[in-house]
Amino acid sequence: MSAEEVLLQSPLLYRVLRGQDGALSIEVLVGGIVQFEVRVRLTPDEAAAFAREGRAFSDRLAQAIQADPPFGGRSMRSPNP
């Protein structure tokens, strides 16, 4: 069994995950010539917004992360599969 559940997979090159601890995170493909994935753990307010708005919220969040991959120091490189 996987340690994470994929809640949403988007053609905008991101996915929303639920960890074993129940916390939500978003994994986003970023970069230009060199691409890599970063992961941001959702705050309680962001998790509530995702519960209310679903894909619309996660699309906006993914676009914000793509525009600024460090995302205020909140992002980390995703572990390789």
Image (spheres, grey):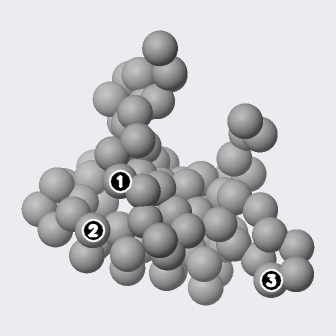
Considering only order in the chain, which callout, 3 or 1, is on the residue closer to the N terminus? 1
What residue does disc 2 label? Answer: 55
Q: Secondary structure at mark 1?
A: strand
Residue at screen point 35% across, 68% down: 58
Task: Tell me, yes or no, if residue 17 can be seen here.
Answer: yes
Residue at screen point 30% across, 60% down: 46
Considering only order in the chain, which callout, 1 or 2, is on the residue closer to the N terminus? 1
In the picture as drawn, the residue positioned furthest to the left comes out as: 52
Distance, label 2 to label 1, CA atoms, is 8 Å
Q: Secondary structure at mark 3?
A: loop
User: Residue 33, image x and y in percent?
Assistant: 88, 81
Task: Tell me, yes or no, if residue 72 can be seen here.
Answer: no
Q: Are marks 2 and 1 in contact (CB under 8 Å)?
A: yes
User: What is the crowding at mark 3: few (fewer than 14 residues within 10 Å), some, or many (at least 20)?
Assistant: few
Distance, label 3 to label 2, CA atoms, is 24 Å
Amino acid, disc 3: Gly
Considering only order in the chain, which callout, 2 or 3, is on the residue closer to the N terminus? 3
What residue does disc 1 label? Answer: 8
Q: Is residue 72 left or right of residue 70?
A: left
Residue 62 versus residue 5 in the image, above or below: below
Residue 2 versus residue 55 in the image, above or below: above
What residue does disc 3 label? Answer: 32
Distance, label 1 to label 3, CA atoms, is 23 Å
User: What is the crowding at mark 2: few (fewer than 14 residues within 10 Å), some, or many (at least 20)?
Assistant: some
Q: In the rendered picture of this protein, how many numbered marks are placed on residues?
A: 3
Amino acid, disc 2: Arg
In the picture as drawn, the residue positioned furthest to the top comes out as: 1
Q: Is residue 36 left or right of residue 49?
A: right
